[in-house]
Amino acid sequence: MATRQGSVDEMNAKLLRLESLLLNEQPCLVSADALAAMTSMGVSDEMGYALLLASAFGLRPDEVEEDRRLVYESLLPSLQALDTSVFENNPYYRDITLPETTFRDVALTYMQYAPCQSFPCGDLKMEGGRLRAPLGFFKTPFRYPAITQDGREWMTVTPNEIRTMQDAVDAACGHVLVYGLGLGYFAYMVSMKEAVQTVTVVDVDEAVITLFKRHIWPQFPETASRKIMLVQQDAFAHAEQTQFRRQGRPCDVVFTDLWHDAGDGIPLYRRMRTLEQRYGSQGQQFHYWIAPTIRYYMGVDD
């Protein structure tokens, strides 16, 4: 077997480059028929998927040691065949139905993952020095709620959002302050909790707020709906003005989701963390969407 030497850091970087090419250029690189042919030979869905990706990207894991390590030690542990029913039974997916409607240039709609389409499904994390960059795929079509602007995907509630918000949902209690409305997923999930008394949601976008008020909020149960207060304001101006308080009382949990991904999230994350350090009170919990991924790209651990 030929050998190419590569450090763990180099392997982690190669995994990110491979996944970036896959997600940004060819997310449907693996076909359902090709995967079915692989699994018919007795390999798992994840193994078949990894081997098909390796072949498509010109990797030779049976001949080149570095390729073997990339496929078996980095790519394969990051892959997961997901069960559509797990997400279809999520309370928001189950209870909230979006109409196909628009307000100005913004539309409520549904979008769809094709069978075997690759998509992110969790935060980046390190395990024993190895990077795990979770990728998911469904073997059947899967549709998800979305907001589009001028026909382009803008906000979504995908399996990735569900997974990466779960820790903050679990932590929510008392008085919750949310920066970023989106499709109201986080507001819905936390307002349904008995341990949550109030949910203040701050968003600057009139169109997003209008669509939420008209078509999504009315579907919330009354016990959850009456906990929610919407504020149309810039998130950072609100944080400066209120110092993370509601009616003079520090909010118990503050959740910030103002970015699309880690790329545009880093400066916004830094800005809100600065305000947290300036105004946050002892006992308050601050959570940030995809914070582990953002911190990875920032090169920090805390």
Image (cartoon, rainbow, N blue to C red):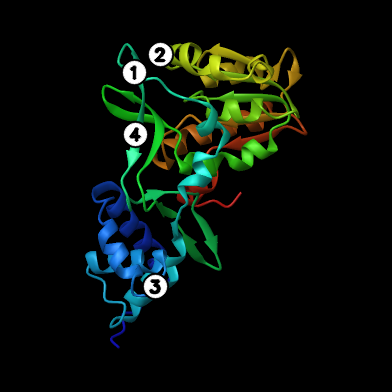
- Residue hosting label 4: 111
Task: Point out which mark residue 207 bears.
Answer: 2
Q: CA distance from mark 4 to mark 3?
A: 31 Å
- Which residue is at 35% across, 68% downward? 39
Depth check: give the residue in front, 85 or 253.
85
Q: Are marks 2 and 1 in contact (CB under 8 Å)?
A: yes
Q: CA distance from mark 3 to mark 1?
A: 44 Å
The picture quadrant where one finds residue 172 is top right
As drawn, is 248 to the left or to the right of 238? right
Depth check: give the residue in front, 164 or 86.
86
- Which residue is at 50% across, 19% downward? 216
Q: CA distance from mark 2 to mark 1?
A: 7 Å
Depth check: give the residue in front, 97 or 155.
97
Q: Are marks 2 and 4 in contact (CB under 8 Å)?
A: no
Q: CA distance from mark 4 to mark 1?
A: 14 Å
Which one is in front in this view, the residue at disc 3 or the one at disc 1? 3
Give x and y (percent) for residue 63: 28, 83
Looking at the rendered structure, the secondary structure element under dot 4 is strand
Q: Are marks 3 and 2 in contact (CB under 8 Å)?
A: no
Dot placed on the residue nearer the N-terminal end, 2 or 4: 4
Outermost bottom residue: 1
- Residue hosting label 1: 106
Q: Amino acid at mark 2?
A: Ala
As drawn, is 231 to the left or to the right of 263? right
- Which residue is at 53% across, 32% downward? 94
Give the vertical position of 199 relative to 214 (above or below).
Answer: below
- Residue hosting label 3: 43
